Image (cartoon, rainbow, N blue to C red):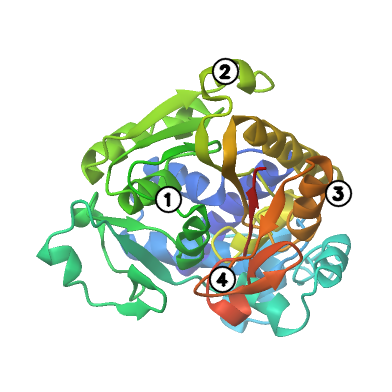
Amino acid sequence: MTPAARTQAAIELLDAVVAAARDNGPAADTLIGRYFATRRYAGSKDRRAVRELVYAAIRALGERPADGRAALVALACTQEDLAATFDGSPHGPAALSVDETAAVPGLAPVWLLDRLRASGLEGGSLDALIDRAPLDVRVNTLTAGDDALALAGEAIPGLPDALRLPAGTDVTPLAGRVEVQDAGSQIVTLAVQATPGAQVVDLCAGAGGKTLALAAAMANEGRILACDTDRGRLSRLAPRAAKSGVTIAEPLLLDPSRELEALADWRGRADAVLVDAPCSGTGTWRRNPEARWRLTPDRLDRLVATQARLLDIAAALVRPGGAVIHVVCSLLDEEGADQAAAFTARHSGWIAEPLDLPAGRARGPGWRLDPARDGTDGFFVARFRAP
C-alpha cells in the first residue's frame, strides 16, 4: 500500500469506529481485525501503519469526530508527512481544501472532564489516562512451567505472580500458563481475599480473567460460580479454564433482570461475591481510547443504576460475615466512592473494610488505582463485610 492508500484505509476504519461509538457497535480492535480480514493484499507493515494512524487519531480526539476524514485532518494539521498523503491519488484521500473541517484535539468531552476533575484528577493524572498501556501478565501458578517462569520481564511490586513484559512480546504459545492481565486488575482481585476451599461468586465474570485469577489464589480448591448475561463473552471461559488447569469454575448464563431467580440456590451461602460491574471504563482509556466517544451523561446514569442493582443482588448471596467486593475500571466517584457509600447507606449493618493493596490509595470507603501514580489501569475497589 502507498502512504496515501494507508491514510485512506485509516479514514475508512475511523468512519466505522465513529459509527460504532455512536451506535454502541463493536470495539475499534474488532473493526480493524474485520477490515483487514477482507483485504489480504495489505502486508504486515501496512496493517501496523494503518492501525497506528487509527489509534493516533482516536487518542488525539476527546470528542467523537464527525467522520474519519475530520479525525485524520486533525492529525494532518500538525504532521506535514501525513498532510502530503492527501494527494487525490487513485487509492488515496482527496486533496485538502482551504475550508477543510478538522476535528478539535482534546482529552475528553467537557462534561466528562468536569466529572473527572470533581473526582480528584488534575494535570498529569488526566494526561496519563490516554498513555499507551504496558503489557502485564499473570503467571498461572496452577500450570506454569519453566518457560513461563523464565519470561524476560520486570517484576511488579506486591504481585509475585505478575510480570511487565516488553511491548510486542508474543505470549500466545504460553496460553493457559500465562494470562494477559493488567497489574491493576490483578491488584483489585486481591481484595476478594480468596482462599482454598472458599465458595465464591463472580457475578459479572465476562470472559473470566478474574475468575481464573481467583481459582489460582484458591489453589483450584473450592467453588467459583462465574456468571454473566453476555453469552458470547461467558462462552470463552470454559476453554480458557481448561488450558489453565482450572476445574472449580462453573459458568452460569444469567437472564438480565432475573438474576436472583437463577441464583436462588446461592442465597446466603457465598463467602464472597465479586461484582466487577459494567462501568464507564474511564480507567481503561489507555487500552480502549474510543470509549471516550461512547460515553454520555445518560449512559453514565444508567451504568450507576445497574451497578447499584448488582450490588444489591450480591448482598443477598453472601452468608453472614461474608463479603461483597465492588470493582469498577473507572476513576469517577459516581461509580466508585459515591457508589460504595450509597451501598452501606442502603444496607444496615454492613461495613466497608479498610484495604491495603500493593498500589493505590484510599478513596472514600474504598481504594483507587491511578494510571499516573500507580502505572496501572484506573480502578476503584471496595470490600463490604456482611453483618
Residue positioned 41% across, 44% down in the render? 211
Residue at mark 3 to residue at mark 4: CA–CA distance: 32 Å
Q: For this rendering, which residue is in front, 195 or 4?
A: 195
Neighbor class of circle 1 (other Cα within 10 Å; few <14, some 14-19, many 20+) is: many
* Disc 1: which residue: 194
The quarter of the image holding the C terminus is top right
Residue positioned 33% across, 78% down in the render? 155
The quarter of the image holding the N terminus is bottom left
Element assignment for label 1: loop
Badge nearest the viewer, 2 or 3: 2
Q: Are marks 2 and 3 in contact (CB under 8 Å)?
A: no
* Disc 3: which residue: 297
Q: Is residue 66 visible?
A: no
* Disc 2: which residue: 264
As drawn, the label of residue 356 is 4
Three-letter residue code for mark 3: Pro
